[in-house]
């Protein structure tokens, strides 16, 4: 399974739901079809099923918990509103919040690092720094809250 590819698929699917007003299932199907057609998977189908399953798990989980995730983000977006973020930054932040708060087995700092890399690749030149700043606050305050429990 290729976890980074799965995250890219999930973010692309989430992006498409906003751009084209399609369901998350339709969006992920489209992304997967494009990957297969363009041979973006490098001709290696080994592990693709697991990658696709993980991508769907992420995309569906984020969609199901979108309001809770956006509420979390609002706490850490200083001077920004979730709906005013660039679409790609918004989806990347949602992915990382989901992995930090709702997905088991992903260390928070690893989720932040993955989100930063996605933001650098798909966002604008400031996206990586912006995503790092928002998620850095989220992780720090989440860890402090856990210690105080």
Image (tube, grey):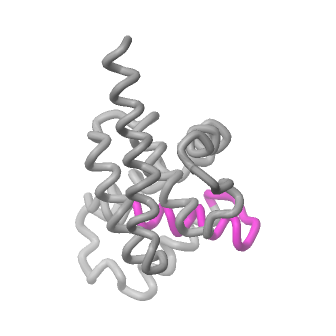
Please report the bounds of the magenta region as a residue range.
Answer: 7-25
User: Residue at position x 46%, y 70% from top?
Assistant: 127
Q: In the rendered picture of this protein, how many numbered marks are placed on residues?
A: 0
Q: Picture coordinates of residue 96 (x, y %)? A: 43, 50
- Reply yes or no: does residue 78 show up in magenta: no
Front residue of 134 and 39: 134
Up-down: is 73 above or below 149? below
Query: Magenta segment: does it hold 11?
Result: yes
What residue occupies the far bottom of the structure in this picture?
38
Q: Establish if 57 lies above or below 102.
A: below
User: Please, is residue 74 above or below residue 17 in the view?
Assistant: above
* Left/right of residue 35 with respect to residue 107 in the rendered view: right
Question: Is 127 placed left or right of 14 in the picture?
Answer: left
x, y percentage for residue 109? Answer: 27, 46
Q: Which quadrant is the N terminus positioned in?
A: bottom left
Q: Quadrant of residue 71?
A: top right
The location of residue 85, given as percent across then percent down, is 63, 64
Which residue is painted at 37% across and 74% down in the image?
A: 120
| SS majority, magenta | helix
> x, y (%) of residue 92?
48, 60
In the foreground, 133 or 42: 133
Q: Is residue 107 left or right of residue 39?
A: left
Q: Quadrant of residue 142?
A: top left
Q: Is residue 102 above or below residue 112?
A: above
Q: Residue extending furthest right?
A: 21
In the image, farthest residue toward the front:
79
Name which residue lies at 43% across and 80% down.
Answer: 125
Q: Looking at the figure, which quarter contains the C terminus? A: top left
Left or right: 37 in relation to 147: right
Q: Residue 47's quadrant in the figure?
A: bottom left
Residue drawn at 62 percent across, 68 percent down: 87
């Amino acid at each position: 399974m290729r976890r980074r590819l799965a995250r890219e698929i999930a973010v692309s699917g989430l992006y498409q739901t906003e751009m084209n007003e399609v369901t998350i299932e339709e969006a992920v199907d489209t992304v997967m079809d494009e990957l297969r057609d363009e041979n973006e998977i490098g001709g290696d189908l080994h592990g693709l099923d697991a990658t696709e399953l993980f991508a769907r798990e992420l995309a569906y989980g984020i969609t199901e918990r979108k309001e809770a995730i956006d509420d979390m983000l609002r706490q850490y977006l200083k001077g920004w509103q979730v709906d005013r973020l660039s679409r790609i930054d918004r989806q990347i932040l949602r992915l990382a919040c989901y992995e930090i708060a709702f997905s088991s087995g992903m260390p928070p700092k690893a989720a932040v690092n993955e989100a930063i890399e996605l933001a650098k690749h798909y966002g604008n030149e400031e996206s990586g720094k912006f995503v790092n700043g928002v998620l850095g606050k989220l992780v720090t305050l989440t860890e402090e809250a856990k210690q105080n429990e």
